[in-house]
Amino acid sequence: MNADAKCGLTAQSSYVELAVEVFAMLADATRVRIILALRDGELSVNQLAEIVDKSPASVSQHLAKLRLARMASARQDGQRVFYRLTDEHARQLVADAIFQAQHAVDSHPAHHDRDRLGHGKITGLS
C-alpha cells in the first residue's frame, strides 16, 4: 500500500481524471481489438482492418484516436504506414480487462493456466 501511495495510486491522485479518459478510450470494441492485434508487433492499416473485420477507413479513425491518446504510434515506410503500441500499458490494461471478463463467465479462466503451468505468457487472448 505504501508503494501505491508513492506512485500516486491514491483516491486523491491528480491522475484519476486522466485514468477515466484512458478507460473511455478503451470503451470501444474495435479499439480493444486493434490493441490486441498490435500486442505482438506493428501492422499496417490494411492488415488491422482484415484482423478486426472493419474497413480501412474505420480502422484509420480508431488509430488516430489511439495516437492522440499516445497509446499507438506510426512509422511510415514508403506509401505504407505501420502502427504499433507505444508501450506495454495499453496491452496490459486490455489483458486485465479480458481476464476480468473471463472471471465473470468462467469459474476457471484460461489465464489461470499460465500460473499453474509456470509460464509467464498471456493465455486466453486469441
Image (cartoon, rainbow, N blue to C red):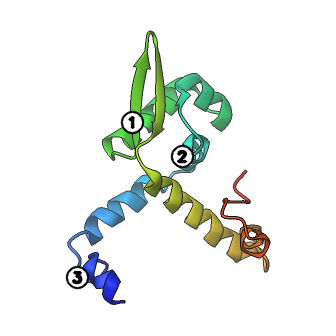
Q: Which residue is mark 1?
A: 73
Q: Which residue is mark 3?
A: 12
| Three-letter amino acid code of the residue under disc 2 | Ile
Q: CA distance from mark 3 to mark 1?
A: 31 Å
Residue drawn 59% across the image and 46% down it: 33
Residue drawn 20% across the image and 72% down it: 14
Question: Where is residue 23 shown, x and y percent of the image?
Answer: 42, 61
Q: Nearer the viewer, residue 29 or 109?
A: 109
The relative height of residue 79 versus residue 34 in the rendered view (above or below) is: above
Q: CA distance from mark 2 to mark 3?
A: 29 Å
Q: Check residue 35 in the rendering and tell me which mark sits there, or answer none.
A: 2
To which quarter of the image does residue 106 belong?
A: bottom right
Question: Where is residue 11 shown, x and y percent of the image?
Answer: 28, 83
| Three-letter amino acid code of the residue under disc 3 | Gln
Instruction: Tell me which label, 3 or 1, sits earlier in the chain.
Output: 3
Residue drawn 37% across the image and 58% down it: 22
Q: Quadrant of the N terminus?
A: bottom left
Q: Determine whether the residue tagged by mark 1 lies in a helix, strand or loop.
A: strand
